[in-house]
Image (cartoon, rainbow, N blue to C red):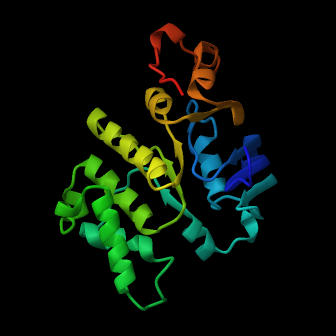
Amino acid sequence: MSGQPILATENVTLAYGTRAVVTDATIAVAPGERLALVGPNGAGKSTLLRAMTGLLGARAGTIRLDGAPVASVDRRTMARSIAVVPELVQLPFAMPVTEVVALGRIPHEPPLGGLRPVDRTAVEAAIDRVGLTDLSARDVRELSMGERQLVFIAVALAQAAPILVLDEPTAHLDIRHQVEVMQLLVDLNERDGRTIIAVLHDLALAANFFPRVVVMDGGRIVADGPPADTLDASHIRDVFGVDPELVRLPIRAA
């Protein structure tokens, strides 16, 4: 990797109470990269993602954003740098798509000042980018799960951060919407230049849509590289504990 990483962990150990969840994790993410974190349940993927976005402090090691320790970065700067799309959530009350996506402008708008023209333009552009302009006035709760996931990606786009982090963005979606979300992420990465980091359970999606795959097991990074190397037969067998012949991944050539 040439140049300074946009986001990096250096020998990071993470814990909940006395229980270590991630041990000695080192990842350097270059600006404009697209990578997936995969591994079995309990491998530490989401925990590492939380730490990389500043939501969890490290017991040991350092996490850096543009070279600066994350612990020293204020929350507003963090929000302008990293947009997080959580696992699909349910809204407790009615909100139209436009109002939900406008939440992405909170790091940019003046306190108590409401949306400015520049914010409204960003919201409209984000909704258009994910293909939901025709649904912008609809209550988000009335949308399909695939459409709702696109809404929350639009929230992240309205945030206008260079790094987009997603935790299980295709969970609970049917195959058509899974592919639509993956294709959108590829487009955001290749056409817009956004850095994409996603936790995925579906190895086929990771293999086909991400040129770099980081494999975690037991709280440690056990492989990091192109999917042809990291999702090979030995890692499928050793990490996921299944017969590789039962998990034939159509990995595209780099």
Query: Where residue 133 sits in the image (x, y, percent)?
Result: 22, 63
Q: Quadrant of the N terminus?
A: top right
Taking depth in this image into account, of 20 and 181 the one nearest to the observer is 181
- The residue sitting at 29% across, 54% down in the picture is 148
Residue 143 occupies which quadrant of the picture? bottom left
Taking depth in this image into account, of 201 and 118 the one nearest to the observer is 118
Q: Is residue 110 above or below residue 137?
A: below
Q: Is residue 201 above or below residue 85?
A: above
- The residue sitting at 37% across, 73% down in the picture is 122
- The residue sitting at 34% across, 37% down in the picture is 179
- The residue sitting at 46% across, 19% down in the picture is 249
Taking depth in this image into account, of 232 and 219 the one nearest to the observer is 232
**Could one spot residue 131 in this view of the protein?**
yes
**Is residue 130 found left or right of 110 in the rendered image?**
left
**Could one spot residue 100 in this view of the protein?**
no
Query: Where residue 15 sits in the image (x, y, percent)?
Result: 73, 49
Residue 120 occupies which quadrant of the picture? bottom left
Q: How many marks?
A: 0
Q: Is residue 70 above or below residue 233?
A: below
**Is residue 170 found left or right of 99 in the rendered image?**
right
Query: Where residue 73 sits in the image (x, y, percent)?
Result: 70, 71
Taking depth in this image into account, of 120 and 86 the one nearest to the observer is 120
Q: Quadrant of the C terminus?
A: top right
**Is residue 95 found left or right of 209 in the rendered image?**
left
Residue 231 occupies which quadrant of the picture? top right
Q: Is residue 98 above or below residue 170?
A: below
Query: Where residue 114 sits in the image (x, y, percent)?
Result: 38, 88
